[in-house]
Image: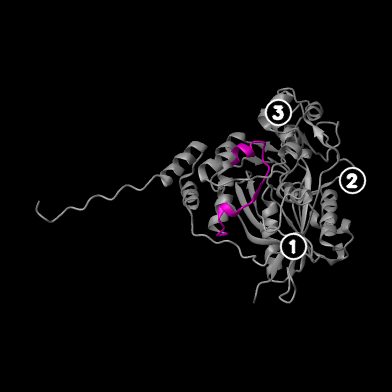
Amino acid sequence: MALHEVRIIGVGHELPGDPITTKQAMEHGNVTNFDEEWVKEKLGIETRYSVRELPGKFNEPSLKEGFSNSDICTTAAKRALKKAGMTADQLDLIIVATCTPDFPVPAESTLVQDKLGIDEVATLDVRSACCGAFQAFATALQFARTGYHKNILICAADCGTMFGDQDLDHDTRQKKAQSVNWLLIGDAAGAMIMRSFEPTEKPWGIEILHSHFKAIGKGVTPGFYMPAGGSSKPFSNSVLEKGEHFFAHNFRQVLEHGQELYWRSINEIVDGGKISLSDIDLYIPHQANGKLADFARKFESMLGVTINCYNNFAQVGNTANASTYLSLSEVEEKGLAKDGDMIALLGAESTKWLFGTIVLKYHPMDPNYVADASSQRVRVEPSTMSKMCSSMMVYGARSYFALRKMYNSYMAPAPAPAAKASNKAD
């Protein structure tokens, strides 16, 4: 069976309400262990968006009306549908990736279906944090490539600010991690429409060159997690008293292992996608923190290629699953990509250590647009960068200096061959 051509034909996003400044966030969250300048310099964030009603009670967070997870998914979906020139009843499948759904049950995708006014459609939830967007994308791609579903809506959204622990009565309140989480996390939704084209149809929209995701957390404790609320530790008075229904963050673990996730996602472009890094025009990394620009400069110096990153962390914070879809929608909205540009989405999730990669070739999402005749992906042999990353995976480089040492070992000139002994007498 021949696989179908699949394109992205619409994108959209939603940021709930008005931006919240760091000063406002510190006041609402009763953050007293930092000042605004420190937050801007060290955390790299200036504003974020929240579905949470602020000011409000620390231990009784309430939603702004009309801004639930399913609400912001629906708004982003409607914008993506409009971009695609479609109506909601043309959808065959809805997939929602989130770790902060409206409810444990029913599924978030069914709530989005209802709010879009669709009588009958296939629905599916992906429950993961930052890399759920990549898992949902790959899942949709399989349905589309086989032609099983034609028009697929993928939403990626999170409302993490509802789970920030700023209650003075909880022991965790005094931990620096809780205040950092409160300031770093933002809420948002991103959406895209994926279409499967029949062999007789002329494809249009953004090409999909490669998609990949994996978990590598064997034997490693989670870096970001929620201590309770699942079937292994349901909600109880004890859980509420200890604040175990809020997010917890092991920053030491994230600092130790986090950058490896980005390395693996970049390596996948070469090893899995067979695409040269020098051909990537724009990287859209998961916006985990405000230091991604510094991280990109380190990569540039080590790999000898330009790492042109789209960054919006200072404006929106870490929006978890929404991050890369939101960024792609903003790139489209701002006209930052031109026809033929190669765009790499990089996923990194520190819950149980996941990474993801999506490589796209941008074309305007217009069925009447005539694209360049050449749409073949660029294939290369495994490169020095690929070999270096493979060794990093095996030996577990844990710092920039370790990666630099490894890079230098690969780039060092080969030793000159030893002179052959002569059999002739002098």
Check residue 288 for magenta coloring: yes
Q: Residue 373 location, x and y as percent? A: 67, 67
Give amino acid for label 3.
Answer: Val
Asked if residue 226 shows in the view, the reply is yes
Circles 3 and 1, Cβ within 8 Å, touching? The answer is no
Is residue 99 visible from the viewing direction of this image? no
Q: Which quadrant of the view contains residue 136?
A: bottom right
Callout 1: SS: loop
- In the rendered image, the vertical position of residue 244 relative to residue 390, given as above or below: above
Are discs 1 and 2 less than 8 Å apart at CB?
no
The kind of residue tagged 1 is Gly
Q: Which of marks 1 and 2 is nearer the N terminus?
A: 2
Is-magenta flag for residue 69? Answer: no
Give the extent of the magenta segment: 273-296
Secondary structure of the residue carrying tag 2 is loop
- Horizontal and vertical percent for residue 81? 83, 59
Q: Name the residue under label 2.
A: 66
Q: Distance between the residues labelled 1 and 2?
A: 31 Å
Q: Which mark is residue 264?
A: none
Q: Badge 3 local density, few (<14 within 10 Å), some, or many (20+)?
A: some
The residue that label 3 is drawn on is: 39
Q: Which residue is located at x 79 percent, y 27 percent?
A: 23
Establish if 242 lies above or below 287.
above
Check disc 1 and report the residue beneath it: 205
> Is 66 left or right of 127, judged from the image as shown?
right
- Determine which quarter of the picture holds residue 167: top right
Gap in Å between the C-alphas at discs 3 and 2?
Answer: 30 Å
Q: Going 85% across and 63% down the picture, which residue do you hit? A: 86
- How far apart in space, not on screen, are marks 3 and 1 (Cα)? 40 Å
